[in-house]
Amino acid sequence: MRASLAVYGLLHFLIDAIGAATVFAILERDGRSPGTPLLLAYGLISFASRPLLGLLVDARDSARHAAMAGSALVACGSVLFAGRPFEAVVALGIGNALFHVGAGSISFRLMPGRAGPSGLFAAPGALGVFAGTTLGSHALTHSWIGGSALLVLAAVSSTLSEPPRDVDSSNVDARDTDAPVLFVLLSIALVSFAGFALRFPWQSTPSLAIVVVTGVAIGRAAGGVLADTFGWRLIALGGLLAAIPLLMSGATHVILGVFGAVLLNLAIPVASTVTFNRLRAHPAFAFGLVSLALIAGGLPALVGASASTLPRNSGLLALPLACGALYFGFRRASLLTTAALRRVQIASPT
């Protein structure tokens, strides 16, 4: 398990770093603004396509192959951007999506029912996006080096065993699945929106921006591990509630803002794993739905909006709403599980 998390974690960092670096290098070279349709296209292709691609990956039972194919596409896209920016963005977007649903599906299945692997897999992505955006914005890209590293790691991933997939979904009533999943996905979208809206003025300082992004990665990595140890509800809901007063003071107190970012992200791996638990027969699709929720919350960033253009305190308002949605998602899932057990007991012969 450790080898798989290490390899797919490194690939996650490279996939997101190379994709962001290439797209922002194109924008920098052509003098386009960050809100350009090219960036919007990359974001929508790489995130919004994941549920559909996840269904295809589940149908083919080919998560590892999807991750490898996605890595190869991103490597190709990174060397195409100089002369073919549109083709490069399409290759990068599809490759990004394929890798994430494939590797994300594997992270769910490494330790089914535990949130730790999901968080450890997710954490490097935040660092990769930041590194790629920074390098690309300064036109510092080394596409051949990054592409070669991707292909080498993808080859290494081919030697790793793929965990089995639970194809027996008979214990989950399809009519009972929608409500808890929708609540949990809504909470993910609200947390994503809050993370965008609660950007502080001091984050324009590069050194402090790195600290915040590191806090986001730590929150996602630690969230799953802590939740498995101390309880999912305590860590996810407690983290969101504790983040509110810290983020309220984050504009003037850097340390409080950073700790608020850590606590804010504790819920992400937990909510992601709850989604998987309700859709165990479709792990890649579950990861695709989580990704769709994340991009829905971050859509203002993709269209070039700044935090200052949003209604005042909208990010802070989103956090109690996220808590409420996640609480009802937990509660609804628990009630449905209890009801299912009762149906089994009633049906069983005495």
Image (cartoon, grey):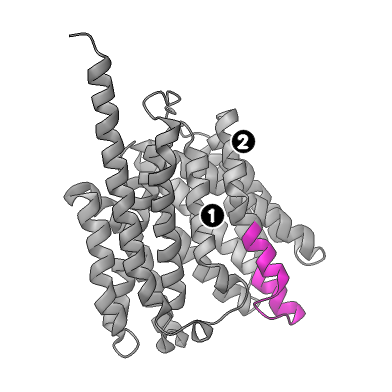
Using the image, tell me which numbered label, if any, was put on residue 82. none
Using the image, tell me which numbered label, if any, was put on residue 292. 1
| Whether residue 140 is situated above or below residue 202 in the rendered picture | above
| Whether residue 101 is situated above or below residue 147 in the rendered picture | above
For residue 172, side relative to residue 73 (left or right): left
Of labels 2 and 1, the one closer to you: 1
Residue 59 image-quadrant placement: top right
Q: Position of residue 126 (x, y in %)?
A: 45, 64
Q: CA distance from mark 2 to mark 1?
A: 16 Å
Query: Circle 2: is it few (<14), some (14-19), or many (20+) Cα within 10 Å?
Result: some
Q: Residue at x 58, y 55 (%)?
A: 47
For residue 186, side relative to residue 101 (left or right): left
Q: Position of residue 56 (x, y in %)?
A: 61, 35
- Secondary structure of the residue carrying tag 2 is helix
Asked if residue 152 can be seen in this view, the reply is: no
Q: Which residue is mark 2?
A: 56
- In which quadrant will I find the C terminus? top left
- In which quadrant will I find the N terminus? top left
For residue 38, side relative to residue 148 (left or right): right
- The kind of residue on which mark 2 rests is Leu
Do tag 2 and tag 1 residues touch (Cβ < 8 Å)? Answer: no
Q: Residue at x 27, y 39 (%)?
A: 335
Query: Circle 1: is it few (<14), some (14-19), or many (20+) Cα within 10 Å?
Result: many
- The kind of residue on which mark 1 rests is Leu
| First in residue order: circle 2 vs circle 1 | 2
> What stretch of residues is rendered in magenta?
23-44
